[in-house]
Amino acid sequence: MIDAALTDEELERYARHIVLPEIGGPGQQKLKRSRVLVIGAGGLGAPVLEYLAAAGVGTLGIVDDDTVSLSNLQRQVIHGSDTIGMAKTDSAAAAIMRINPNVTVESHRLRLTAENAPALVARYDVVVDGSDNFETRYAAADACAGEKKPLVTAAVGRFDGSVTVLKPFETGADGKRNPSYRDLFPEAPPEGLVPSCAVAGIVGALTGVIGTLEAMEAIKLITGIGEPLIGRLLLYDGLTARFDTIRYKAV
C-alpha cells in the first residue's frame, strides 16, 4: 500500500491540482494511491501515460508486446528516435521516470487476451484501453465487467475518434444497469471492414486529442469529480473540429 501522505516536493509538484476545490489535497492523495492499467503504449497510450504520470497516479501498469519502430514516432510521442527497437513498455517506463519519478511502473510485456485479462485487470483500480484492435477491446471490456473495474475505452482512425466510460456492474440514476461495451458494439465488424491505421493512415495529433480525453476521464473516476462518459459516446471530427455525443443504453 502506497503512503498517501504528500511530501513537500509533491505538494509543490501538484500545486495546480491542489488549489482546485474539486481535487485539493484529498483528491491528490486518491491519485497517489491509485493503480491504473493502460493497455497499449502506442498512439492513445502515449498521452494517457504521460498525463497520468504527470498527474501523480501512484502506480501505472503498461500492457504492450511490441517494440518501437520509426513509423510509430509520428504519433506515439512517449517514444523517441533513441528508443527505436526497444520494447515499448521499457521505452514508456523510462519516459515516465523522466516526467515523474514518484510513479511506480509495472510493465507487462504481453498481448492482452480473454485468458489473461481477468487476473491482470483485477490488480488495478481503473483500466484505460488504448489498443488498436477489436479482439483486445472486447477482452478488456469483458474482463473489466467481470472484475467490476471501470474502463475508459477509445478508438481512432484517420481524422476521427471516440471515447466512452464503462461501468456495467453499476446502475445509473434511473436505477437501470449501466451499458456495457457489448451493448454499444454487440459484435466486432467483419475482419477487413475497418482498415488499420497502417492502411488508412492517421493524423498523429488526433491520438493526442483522444488519448488526453481518456486521461481526463480516468482522473475524474479516481477523484470522484464531474460526470464520467458513462452511457455516452463522445465523438470527435478533427477535420471540422466538432464534438458530438451519442447516448446509449443497456439492451
Image: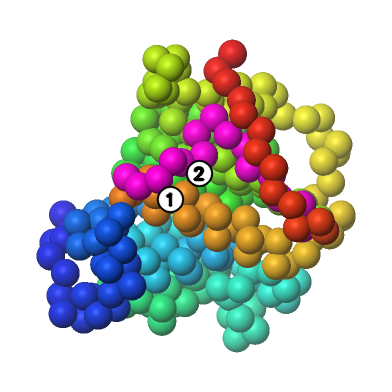
Alpha-carbon distance for marks 2 and 1? 7 Å
Q: Which residues are magenta?
A: 224-238
Instruction: Give the residue drawn at x 81%, y 56%.
Output: 240
Q: Secondary structure at mark 1?
A: helix
The answer to which of 107 and 243 lies nearer the viewer is 243
Q: Earlier in the sequence, mark 2 or mark 1?
A: 2
The reply to whether dot 2 and dot 1 touch (C-beta < 8 Å) is yes
Question: In the rendered image, is residue 28 in sight?
Answer: no
The answer to which of 140 and 217 lies nearer the viewer is 217
User: Does residue 235 show up magenta in the picture?
Assistant: yes
Image x and y of residue 246, in percent? 66, 33
Q: Which residue is mark 2?
A: 152
Q: Which residue type does callout 2 highlight?
A: Val
Q: Is residue 65 left or right of residue 120?
A: right
Q: Quadrant of residue 22?
A: bottom left
Image x and y of residue 179, in percent? 52, 23
Instruction: Give the residue drawn at x 48%, y 69%.
Output: 50
Quarter of the picture holding the N terminus: bottom left
Instruction: Give the residue drawn at x 58%, y 58%.
Output: 211
Q: Which residue is mark 1?
A: 218
Q: Is residue 101 above or below residue 157?
A: below
Circle on res. 4: none
Q: Is residue 73 above or below residue 245?
A: below
Q: Is residue 75 left or right of residue 149?
A: right
Image x and y of residue 154, in percent? 61, 46
Q: Secondary structure at mark 2?
A: strand
* Secondary structure mostly seen in the magenta stretch: loop
